Image: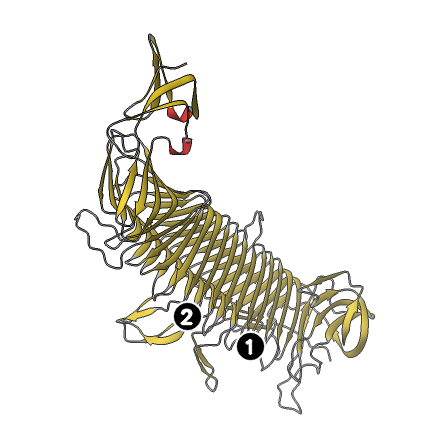
Amino acid sequence: MFGNVFKSSAQERIEFSRQWNHSAYPVSLIDSITTFQENVFNLYSQGKDVPMVVTADSLLFNTELADTLVLAFHNGYVEVNNPHLEYIEVMTDAANVYVRSYGEQPFVCRATGISDDGRLIIDADTICTILLSDLQLTSKTGSAICLKQKQKANIIMAKGTTNILNDAPEYNLSDSTDTSNGCIYSKGSLSFSGAGTLNVCGNFRHAIASSKNITIDEGNINILCTQKDGIHCDKYKQEGGSVKLHLVKDATKGIKVKEAFELKGGCIEGDASGNLTITDGETSYCTLIKSDVSFQLEGGDIHLKHTGKGGRCISVDGDLSIAGGLLDLECHGDGDSYINSANETDYYTPKCVTVDKSISITGGNIHCLSTGLGGKGLVAGSSLTIGNEGEQELPLIRIETKGECIINNQDEDLRFGCPKGIKANDELHIYGGVILVSTTGMGGEGLECNGALYIHGGSLECNTFDDGINVGQSVEISGGQVYCYSIDNDGIDSNGSITISGGIVASVNQSKPNESFDSEAGQLYLLGGIVFGLGSSSVDIAASTFPCYSSPFNDSGEGVPSRGLILTDGKYVYIQRDGETIMALRNDNQTFRTYITIMSPSFVDDEELTISEGECPTDFYSSFFNDRLIFGGIPQSTILKTSIKVQTIKNNTYEPFN
């Protein structure tokens, strides 16, 4: 059917000619050519300049390899196939390949084979694509793959293939313009895709490094080792695929981003055992994900586990925002004291997430576990916001710490380097979501905020050793549900005021003379909502909007001072009207006497109520905090303890009911 078949020098099209008929078609549109009779074709093969004449009646094209430079690595040499692209120059030295491209024509380089001493260097003026197909390449002189120009490069891991790259532990570069510092290095942006696997080991400095941006769309990338950073770039964006990080060297980073980190899909897994380093009083931490500017999680999964001293799973010098996805973080290393650069005693602590500026969490599923000395969950250098007023996708946050304080002087009650569940140096706002915080070690606090805490909605539960909530300036609760239970300190503690104007708030402390609501300034304002507190010390209410009651503390010195009611821990404390349950709270206070603080809009001013103790009521109409706080229900085995009078409090005037 056709006469001669010619392939153009630029390999953009195939030309057909027979006598006066002539036509051309792009290579990408042709998958096969069939003739009616045997024809003679001129074919180039194995890089030979002289065409080989063959006879065939059909040609089958692999479109994946159209316009592709094929490199097959061997120990000691490289096979170069299909080099006849006029804009491509290929030079080889043993198993080292240098590819130089000119002009604006993109090209594809397919690399395969095994070599224990080889490199692929591409010096391209335009976009290039590197297709890795079971490539096992180790360099003894520099990076395994080096992209010298600032043009974008695409790296594709062919489906079903496993590719292994190792660079040299020391670089011996004869080309002075080669500034590579990673096993895979590019001066331009890098994108990774394909359904294959890529295993990379950075023996000199970084495993994968780009002077610009890195994008991961698909594929499996495993960082097996690194001396500095596993992945190093300006901006990092991932929408699919899987990245696994393995860090053993002190002060190394898994993913180090100079600007923005963004995860929209895919999965990042990592384990680290490297410790921090201290040089001249300055600390450098082993961190699995480190961003100098911002961190955004909109989708995908992150699973990170750190066992090194002072380890960080995620560290951000700027702002962090989470709108979706899964964040599962564990820190098991210890913190300790050290002498800093100012020649003062300081403390380093392991942190699941530490951010220099603000944290915003509007969605997603977050779990942080820290078991070492002084370990922390979420730490914001400025403000922290959970949920939003629009209440779109609400977050689920679970924070656990199990470590002790680094230094604890029980005699003077001095504790340094204490574990924290959630900490913000400035304001902390909660608009929605479900937040569960638990601490079990000495000094462990649930929420700590040096500024003001605002709870507008959502559900917050703190089960802690130390304060459930500790705030430097003020606590304002206007909605949502809040439950705090402290073993060793106050349920809710504020150095300033505590104002409750809405929601449901329950607070319990277990031992010592501490309070369910502790306002150091004596400013506890109950202006709305439902309040139920059980403590080992009395609470003073400054003012209330609804009728309330707080157990009196008679410290007149006449006789035995009143120290609340004798109640049994594990039982429920009933507040009843004419034998009917208004509300009941499980008493986890283990002191000899318990002080009660209650308020409800259902109370009537100056009415008499009773306090009883019994088992968990049945047939209740609503409950909160895993049935700790119950409304209504049928009393079970109750014993009357006392009668009380509830009354609205104005200007700190309160008349105890005798």
Q: In this view, does 516 lie above or below 51?
A: below
Res 25 → quadrant: top left
Q: Distance between the residues labelled 1 and 2?
A: 22 Å
Q: 101 or 603: which is nearer to us?
A: 101
Residue at the image position 27 percent from the left and 59 percent from the top = 169
Three-letter code for the amino acid on which mark 2 is drawn: Thr
Q: In this view, does 15 lie to the left or right of 523?
A: left
Q: What element carries label 2?
A: loop
Q: Mark 1 points at which residue?
A: 489
**Can residue 486 be seen from the camera position used here?**
yes
Q: Where is residue 11 in the image (x, y as percent from the top left)?
A: 31, 26
Q: 498 or 44: which is nearer to us?
A: 44
Tell me the crowding category of disc 2: few under 14, some 14 to 19, or many 20 or more residues within 10 angstroms, Cα based. many
* Quadrant position of the N terminus in the picture: top left
Q: Where is residue 291 in the image (x, y as percent from the top left)?
A: 37, 54
Q: Which of marks 1 and 2 is in front?
A: 2
Q: Where is residue 10 in the image (x, y as percent from the top left)?
A: 29, 26
**Can residue 611 be seen from the camera position used here?**
no
Q: 130 or 646: which is nearer to us?
A: 130
Q: Residue furthest bottom?
A: 559
Three-letter code for the amino acid on which mark 1 is drawn: Asn
Tell me the crowding category of disc 1: few under 14, some 14 to 19, or many 20 or more residues within 10 angstroms, Cα based. many
Res 354 → quadrant: bottom left
Q: 554 or 385: which is nearer to us?
A: 385
* Quadrant position of the C terminus in the picture: bottom right
Q: Name the residue under label 2.
A: 349
